[in-house]
Amino acid sequence: MTKTTPPAPRDLLELGGSVWLKSGGETLGGAARIALLAAIRDTGSITAAAKAVGMSYKAAWDAIDTMNNLAGEPLVASATGGRGGGGTKLTASALRIIDTYQAVEREHRKFLRRVGEAIEGFEDDWRLIGRLGLRTSARNQLAGKVTKIRRGAVNDEIELGLPGGQTIVAVVTHESTETLGLTEGSDAFALIKASWVMLMEDAPAKLSARNQLRGTVASVTRGAVNAEVTLSLDDATTVTAIITNQSVDTLGLAPGQKAVAVVKASSVIIGVND
């Protein structure tokens, strides 16, 4: 008769987590962007803050644009004298996010048990911090709410409302709609590569492209062949396009000029936070 040895008792599963991830000594996730916000708060200068956290000036501004987009509201107030001017300040929302993140950082080994009671509004702020830590190669990351879902024979058309009132439409498969749990009123974000964004003058035109986002040119950064053009849709949302220098000249694009960002619905990727 074979004797059966009972399995060794298992340790109880426990929930655990950390505030940031590290790979080769580099901080990943949300820590770098929160550190940038804290440095802006402490120095009152984007230039000084970028230097303090080891970012280039351009990388700092790219991060600020992305954070404003993902937050759905301004986190960094406009600086007097232009993008590099002095007197840069954080909004109340940004200050609260920093406080929330740092509190979780101090309490990270206990927060699963205590943080719900320790921090007022933690659930909403933590979801926002998760969006700020999103890492993707897509230059444009726009947060919003699903305002409409149109079912088709094969694909679904997802309409995402942005904070400033404009909308973005994406075409996804039925399976993607179900997998992402998309419903009207749910939070989601749109990912759009800068090379997929076309620009045109702000004038009446009939186009097959579903998305036509109106805004004001915030910056034009020229390279050897192409230029990076950032369009402000509102106080909190920007869209960046990569177009040729010749196109910049042809359209006469310059800061302050009205323009339209054109994006095909098939070029928009929809995502959600877990």
Image (cartoon, helix red, strand yellow):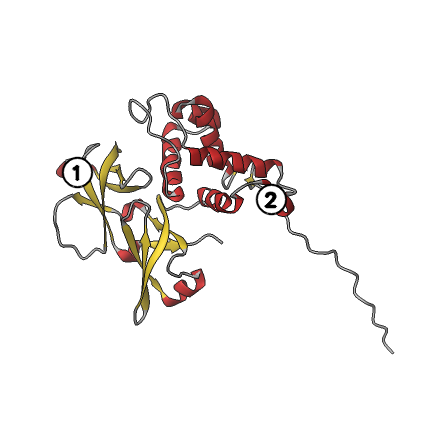
Front residue of 246/52: it is 52
Q: Is residue 6 above or below residue 185?
A: below
Picture quarter containing residue 239? Answer: top left
| Secondary structure type for disc 2 | helix
Q: How many marks?
A: 2
| Secondary structure type for disc 1 | helix
Q: Position of residue 262 (x, y in %)?
A: 22, 49
The reply to whether residue 225 is visible in this rendering is: no
Front residue of 24/215: it is 215
**Residue placed under numbered mark 1 in the picture:** 246
Assess whether mark 2 and mark 1 are in contact (beta carbons under 8 angstroms): no
Which quarter shows the N terminus? bottom right
Front residue of 66/124: it is 124
Residue at the (56%, 38%) spot, across then down: 24
Closer to the observer: label 1 or label 2?
2
In the displayed structure image, the side of residue 271 where residue 228 appears, left or right: left
- Mark 1 is on which residue type? Gln
Residue at the (40%, 66%) spot, across then down: 175
**Residue placed under numbered mark 2 in the picture:** 117
Q: Position of residue 104 (x, y in %)?
A: 58, 39
Determine crowd level at label 2: few under 14, some 14-19, many 20+ residues with C-alpha closer than 10 A: few
Residue at the (48%, 46%) spot, across then down: 124
Q: Position of residue 101 (x, y in %)?
A: 53, 37
- Mark 2 is on which residue type? Glu
Q: Is residue 234 above or below residue 15?
A: above
Q: Position of residue 40 (x, y in %)?
A: 43, 27
The reply to whether residue 153 is visible in this rendering is: yes
